Amino acid sequence: MENGKPEILDPRFAGYLLDSMADGVFTLDGEGRITTWNTSMERISGYSQGEAMGCSCSMLGFNLCIQKSCPAGVKECGIYTKGAVDAKECVLKHKDGHPVPVLKSARLVKDEAGRVIGIVETITDLTELKRARRKAEEYSRRLGEMHRLDNIIGKSHTMQQVFDAIGAAASSEATVLIQGESGTGKELVAGAIHYNGARADAPMVAVNCSALSESLLESELFGHVKGAFTGAVRDRTGRFEEAASGTILLDEIGEVSPFIQVKLLRVLQEREIERVGESLKRKIDIRVIASTNKDLFQLVKEGMFREDLYYRLKVFPIIVPPLRERKEDIPLLTTFFIDQQNGKTGKSIRGLSSTAMRLFLDYYWPGNVRELENAVEHAFVLCRGGEIDILDLPVELRQAEYRAGTAQPVTNPGRSYRKRAAIDRDGLLTMLDQYDWNKAEVARQLGVSRTAVWKYMKKWDIPLSQAQA
């Protein structure tokens, strides 16, 4: 302040100020010609400052503009009649022709005599927000299409334990934490709990917590009120409210920030939420299911995840086993996916050759059931006969055939069978049929050597190949 008057910003700083802004800013003179064009406008529109200066803003092709042909018809622009445009969602046309969703605001600039001397407009790029919202909606739709208990394939001992846990969870209202590697089917388990429970007729809403930034996730979960932040042009209901009387699935819960963790803890404790930009508490009646492919307890020990939130989430934990720990389900899963692809493609593929099935049983499956499904779909593209063979499979599976041991060792193999006192002749025959007479895999499942399997076969007069049986 000098002599009681505010200091005027040095004009040399004005350009730096405009170019430091994330939003696009441009100005028009009284004739509707562009006089200022900041760096963010170059990024959003594709037009450089040199291309824009002196032109009309009609080159941006705003779909909400009320005008004839600028600059000749600038006086008929809607800004002249309204004096201002406040946060209107619209679309501008990028230089290369593609549409860009934006939030537009504008103000008339007048001199001391009240004469219009120009217009200032600000543009917020909504591309990322629209994309994130679209992904979240697609994610929820995909979940709703395919959840029923009979969509979870498995007859292994470990999967029977999962089925029992699903039944127990479905008959209760406890918060569930589903843990398992990527591709094991955690979302299917969540859907089975919801659709077999008391809330089956209410909505199931899913949010992928790893797909959104902290601010977007906060708005997505809790909603916001108009004016809460740039782009909040109207009140918006959050996912917790959309799941009223139903279930919300918080997928990849291990990815949420400490700030969101605090807000989630409050929701679980109080069963109420506050929209962003609002202090009003809203009661919610929902069931919460969380899922993660991370070791949350390890994150707690490392200080990356709140211990109190962890225990609030794991009231009823369910662990979905990786495919390598339930290899007895591979033939069943393979048949299911082959039938599915036959229906989609019109082909009539009967199954896998014995060598391809042996490779399936030996492979480590780091991508779990999802990788198995993709491998079958890949094979359908290449297969020209009635049976899938090794050359029809993805390269990573074919390369595994030539590695010593073919894959990483299975953790605690055959644990479900070790509980038996002994294997009898009928039981061994059943396992041989189940694993296409792959004696190495049968040995792994029994937790014995291949030589021991041969001795059993000799003892009970079982032939060495299926063709001789």
Image (cartoon, helix red, strand yellow):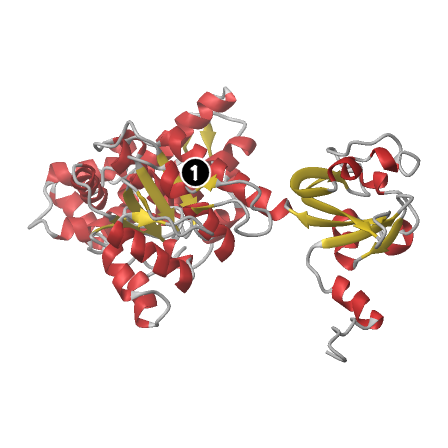
In the image, residue 41 above or below residue 351: below
Residue 42 pos. (x, y %)? 79, 53
Residue indicated by mark 1: 373
Which residue of the protein is positioned furthest toward the bottom in this rendering?
A: 2
> Tag 1, which secondary structure?
helix
How packed mark 1 is, by other alpha carbons closer than 10 Å (few <14, some 14-19, many 20 or more), is many
Q: Quadrant of the C terminus?
A: top left
Q: Is residue 346 above or below residue 121?
A: above
- Viewer-nearest residue: 385 or 166: 166
Decide if residue 225 is on the left or right side of residue 304: right
For the point 71% across and 48% down, the residue is: 123
Determine whether, in the image, residue 302 is placed left or right of residue 428.
Answer: right
What quarter of the picture does the N terminus occupy?
Answer: bottom right
Residue most toward the left?
421
Give the image location of residue 230, x and y in percent: 60, 51
Residue 92 seen from this side: yes
* Amino acid bearing label 1: Glu
The residue depicted at 55 percent of the width and 32 percent of the height is 381
**Between residues 35 and 425, which one lies in front from this camera angle?**
35
Residue 208 drawn at (x, y percent):
44, 47
Instruction: Examine the rendering and report whether any part of residue 212 can be seen.
Output: no
Q: Pick whichever, 197 or 363, lies toward us.
A: 197
Q: Measuring 28% from the left and 35% from the top, which residue is drawn there?
A: 245
Image location of residue 154, percent across then percent down: 27, 37
Using residue 217 as the reference point, say whether residue 426 is left or right of it.
left
Q: Nearer the viewer, residue 229 or 262?
A: 229
Question: 12 left or right of 260?
Answer: right
